[in-house]
Image (cartoon, rainbow, N blue to C red):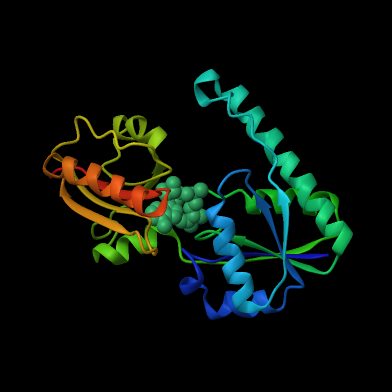
Amino acid sequence: MRVKVLGIGMGPQHVTPEVAGELRSCDYVVAARKRVDDRLLEVRRAVCEQYGVPLVEFDDPQRDRDTVPGNGPAHYADAVRDWHEARVRSYESVLRERGGTAGLLVWGDPSLYDSAIRVVERLAARNDLDWDVVPGISAPQVLAARHRVVLHEVGRPVHLTTARRLREDIAAGQTNLVVMLGGALALDGLEDWSIWWGANLGTDSEELVAGRVGDRLGELAAARARARAAAGWVMDIYLLRGPG
Ligand SMILES: C[S@@+](CC[C@H](N)C(=O)[O-])C[C@H]1O[C@@H](n2cnc3c(N)ncnc32)[C@H](O)[C@@H]1O
């Protein structure tokens, strides 16, 4: 058995020639199907159709959403581990049944906030499996390109984080952050910071806003609502830079 973990960027227009070549060499693509309204599965289906590779779907195991980080890191880690294990078993049963080379299509790039590599590592630990990873275009790259910015100042670092950790990271002294996995924007106290924000990047419902946070709050909320109304979902990402 062989698995190829392939980054597909934000959709078919971002599939690189390298990923396209690897995809054509797959016997099939395997993907989890969420219970409701799985738009990312639709993108995977479009990519598979474009490259003539069959798509094998299975129902995504439910994660225990009642267990939230606030219940304690141990509970949360257990819930995520159980969910990963259930996913591993689902992939395993498809791979064992079909054999050959399977592709796993990852939104953006597999190195950022995605479980595919961890799932395949676990599969490889208990099966005779070769596997490779091929990079895709990630949301931070598209954000930077759309705003025509470098994610950090000359010779300085950029801190990649989640909205959930933002306050903690700022309290720890971070002043140049790329923030992913957010819900509603919560930027109180950061009025003098600069923001470069993007939602649904690379899609028809893309929205962009940039400027001083305090001057852009209304515009940000309106753009976020527009993206959600146009697409039925919203995924956003932003670069935040402290004053001075
Ligand atoms: C589960 S992570 C996946 C990241 C992905 N592997 C990548 O390389 O960009 C999902 C988060 O990435 C960001 N993201 C992914 N696609 C996006 C898009 N098209 N527009 C804006 N943000 C996006 C959002 O912060 C979203 O909450």
Residue at 40% across, 54% down: 231
> Of residues 212 and 169, which is closer to you in this image?
212
Q: Is residue 130 above or below residue 123?
A: below
From the viewer's perspective, tell me whether residue 27 is left or right of residue 156.
Answer: right
x and y percentages locating residue 130 in the rendered image = 78, 64
Residue at 37% across, 60% down: 201
> Of residues 9 and 140, which is closer to you in this image?
9
x and y percentages locating residue 193 in the rendered image = 17, 42
Q: Is residue 40 above or below residue 53?
A: above
> Of residues 84 and 226, which is closer to you in this image?
226
Image quadrant for the N terminus?
bottom right
x and y percentages locating residue 150 in the rendered image = 27, 62
From the viewer's perspective, tell me whether residue 197 is left or right of residue 65.
Answer: left
Total numbered circles: 0
x and y percentages locating residue 134 in the rendered image = 60, 68
Q: Is residue 37 above or below residue 140?
A: above
Residue 52: image quadrant is bottom right
